Amino acid sequence: MTYWTILWITALSGPLDGVAMGIYYPSIESCMEAHQVVSDSLPYDHTVACESTGIASSSLRPRRRPA
């Protein structure tokens, strides 16, 4: 089962100093893939971290009850 994952970005300098923002991804794998791309695109000092949630992003759908 896969869980929603948040990519936390925290600014460490400039006018956004101390501001944190999260981007949701459907799995830890997709968050880790985006980790470096997002980090490379930011021009200021920052930290980037993936944090898994306990909320399932995909699950099996229950079967319909027979009539």
Image (tube, rainbow, N blue to C red):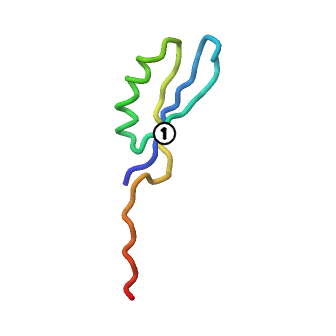
Residue 60 left/right relative to 11: left
Residue 64 placement (x, y as % from top left) = 39, 77
Q: Could you tell me which residue is drawn at 43 percent across and 24 percent down? A: 38
Q: Quadrant of the N terminus?
A: bottom left
Residue 58 position (above or below residue 14): below
Residue 8, x across and y down, in percent: 52, 31
Residue 12 image-quadrant placement:
top right
Residue with the most extreme bottom position: 67
36 shown above or below 33: above
**Quadrant occupied by the C terminus:** bottom left
Q: Amino acid at mark 1?
A: Tyr
Q: Is residue 17 above or below residue 4?
A: above
User: 13 or 43, which is in the foreground?
Assistant: 43
Few, some or many residues within 10 Å of mark 1 (<14, 14–19, 20+): some
Quick check: 57 above or below 47? below
* Residue sitting farthest toward the front: 67
Residue drawn at 58 percent across, 19 percent down: 11
Q: Which residue in the protein does label 1 denote?
A: 24
